[in-house]
Amino acid sequence: MTRRRMLGAALTVGVTVPIGVAGRARAASTAAPAPVQLTLPEPTGPYPVGTVPLHLVDTSRPDPVAGPGHHRELMAAVWYPARGVKRYPPARWTSPAVARALLTSAGFPADVAVAPLTAGHEGAPVLRTGRRLPVVVFSHGAHDHRADTTIVVQELASHGYVVVTVDHTYDAFSVFADGRLTVPLDRPALTPRDFATDIRFVLDRVEDLAAGRNPDAEHRPLPAGLPGALDAQRIGMFGWSKGASATAFVMSEDRRVRAGLSFDGPMQPTVTTDLDRPFMLMTAEFPRATQPSVAEFWSHLRGWRLAIQAEGAVHSSYCDVQFLVPQLAKATGMSAADLQGWIGTLDPGRAVRIQQAYPLAFFDLHLRHHRERLLDGPSAAFPEVKFIP
């Protein structure tokens, strides 16, 4: 089976794929080096960023693993523009337990690195500017986690968006409020439709927040100003890989999502519903030219649509992996060939700028009606980004 077919099958049925790249990364040395402190780039927006975790319980659905009397549980995080952040600590990219599990899954020593701090400040009050804030929801890929696009998430929040990220339990590395660690399981094998069901439940919780209600299962205090800050009439969604396919399914079933963005989604199973709302593809290993399911999905887009591709990108190039793995490579002595297997030939710094600029331009256009020339055609500022007619 080719690498592409292995990855495509895994994305469809939920086979373990180490942080989205099938078997391409292993540390060059088994010796345990001193832990390296990983870093993330700062967002470019004018606002500081706050964040808060939420424990969500869907009492309408049974838990597929825990048995009778248990309901579907999800961990989520809300990111938002903040004020007065100095008294609030920076949030970690993920918990130490999840970081160790992710490293082990990817073939690295469990303690080779310390997860980075983010630009988000835990529990900081929300910046209220007189108008409710547009909302963007994120769905991760197979056997992944909700922090995997933090570069994009904190960028959007720094420009005035509320962003809700979700761990799809049993297809995610996640820690619950009581300290339980859950890791991806081969059974139940969650599909993009299962992810979409999770997201539709999360959209209900977005409406709770917009109405001033606290959706947290334990009713832990929310940051000041968060209840009532969200604009439930301006919701967008993006996803990576399986989460991108889920984005398409959510939009085919739920008109609350006004605009959708795919980070290299395989669109499997094939989406055959016509969509009349804006949708954008940022492709790498699953372009229309070689992926019939993506071409079929594209043919059903009846509204605004755009497809772009960064030259040299691989499947994970639009995620934090593109910036974090080179730091791990330096710490572990990874070979240049193995590193290229992870990140392709797209420069990590350039990948960061693409991650920050294009999603923001897309949601600005379709949730705020701010015209962005960046989406009109090729840009001299981003020569590696190709527009696919």
Image (cartoon, rainbow, N blue to C red):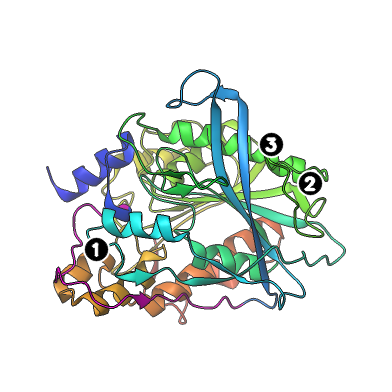
* Amino acid type at image mark 3: Asp
Q: Position of residue 47 (x, y in %)?
A: 70, 75
Q: CA distance from mark 2 to mark 3?
A: 10 Å
- Looking at the rendering, the stretch of residues picked out in magenta corresponds to 20-44
* Number of other residues with Cα within 10 Å of mark 2, as a class: few under 14, some 14 to 19, many 20 or more: many
Which numbered disc, 2 or 3, marks the residue that appears first in the sequence? 3
Whether residue 217 can be seen here: yes
87 left or right of 171 in image: right
Residue at 25% over, 80% down: 330
| Above or below 68: residue 233 | below
Whether residue 378 can be seen here: no
* Amino acid type at image mark 2: Ala
The main secondary structure of the magenta stretch is loop
Contact, mark 2 vs mark 1 (Cβ under 8 Å):
no
Q: Is residue 284 magenta?
A: no
Contact, mark 3 vs mark 1 (Cβ under 8 Å):
no
Which numbered disc, 2 or 1, marks the residue that appears first in the sequence? 1
Residue at 41% over, 56% down: 97
Among the 4 quarters of the image, the one containing residue 71:
top right
Give the labeled residue for mark 2.
210
Q: CA distance from mark 3 to mark 1?
A: 38 Å
* Amino acid type at image mark 1: Phe
Residue at 58% over, 48% down: 76
Q: Which numbered disc, 3 or 1, marks the residue closer to the eye? A: 1
Give the labeled residue for mark 1.
108
Which numbered disc, 3 or 1, marks the residue that appears first in the sequence? 1
- Image quadrant in which the N terminus is located: top left
Q: Position of residue 139 (x, y in %)?
A: 50, 47
The residue nearer to you, when weighing 100 against 280, is 100
Give the labeled residue for mark 3.
204
Direction left: furthest residue: 1
Q: Position of residue 253 (x, y in %)?
A: 58, 31
